[in-house]
Amino acid sequence: MKEKNIGFTIGKFAPLHKGHQLLIETGLKEMDEFFVVVYDTDVTNIDVEKRAQWIKKLYPNVNILYGFNSPKKYGLDDESVNIQMKFLSNIIKDIPVTHFYSSELYGEKVANYLDINNRVVDIEKKVVPISASIIRENLNYGKMYLEDFVWNDLK
C-alpha cells in the first residue's frame, strides 16, 4: 500500500497574499492531504480566526491548525529553532506529516527536525515577488497581490 503523502506549511498569513496562495496550491496539488498552521501574531490586528477564514474561503480542502501563544523568539540559530520546533511539534504531533512546504530558509530546519521532505516553493520570490512584511509597510503597493476579500478586511 502506498504511503499517504501529507504536507503542511506554517505562517502568520498577515495578510494572506498570492505568494502564500502559490505555496498552498502547490501543496494541495502534490499531497494527498495538506495542513496549514496559522500562527497568532502581534504584527496585525486581524485575528487568527479571520486569517484562517481567508485560507478556508479559497481552499476548503485545506486542514487548518492554530498556533496560539506562539513563541516570540525567531531565527535560524539552534536555540530559536529548538523553541519553535517544540511548539510546532506539539501542534502537529498526531499527524504523520511527510513534507514541509515553505518559501523561507527555515524550511530546511523544520524538515530536518521532523525528518521529513523539505519542499521549497519560490524561495527567491521570482514567481510572486512579494512578502507580507512589504504589504504591511505599503498596503497600496501590495493590493495587487491580495484577494479582494482580504483587501477589504485590511482597509
Image (tube, rainbow, N blue to C red):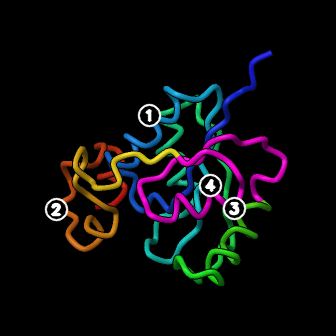
Of the numbered discs 2 and 4, the one sitting upstream in the chain is: 4
Crowdedness of circle 4 by 10 Å Cα count: few (<14), some, many (20+)?
Answer: some
Which amino acid type is shown beneath numbered disc 1? Glu
Q: Residue at x 75, y 57 (%)?
A: 91
Q: Which mark is residue 77?
A: none
Q: Nearer the viewer, residue 69 or 30?
A: 30
Q: Nearer the viewer, residue 95 or 98?
A: 98
Of the numbered discs 2 and 1, the one sitting upstream in the chain is: 1
Question: Do callouts 3 and 4 mark residues in contact (Cβ within 8 Å)?
Answer: yes
Q: Position of residue 41 (x, y in %)?
A: 53, 72
**Residue occupying the far left of the picture:** 141
101 is within the stretch colored magenta: yes
Alpha carbon distance from label 2 to label 1: 25 Å
Give the number of the mark in front: 3 or 2: 3
Give the number of the mark in front: 2 or 4: 4
Alpha carbon distance from label 3 to label 4: 6 Å
* Quadrant housing residue 112: bottom right
Which amino acid type is shown beneath numbered disc 2? Asn
Of the numbered discs 3 and 2, the one sitting upstream in the chain is: 3
Give the number of the mark in front: 2 or 1: 1
Residue under pointer 1? 25
Q: Residue at x 22, y 65 (%)?
A: 139
Relative side of 45 to 8, left or right: left
Label 2's element? helix
Q: Position of residue 76 (x, y in %)?
A: 53, 76
Residue under pointer 2? 140
Residue under pointer 3? 113
Of the numbered discs 1 and 3, the one sitting upstream in the chain is: 1
Alpha carbon distance from label 2 to label 4: 35 Å
Crowdedness of circle 3 by 10 Å Cα count: few (<14), some, many (20+)?
Answer: some
Residue under pointer 4? 111
Q: Which residues are magenta?
A: 91-118
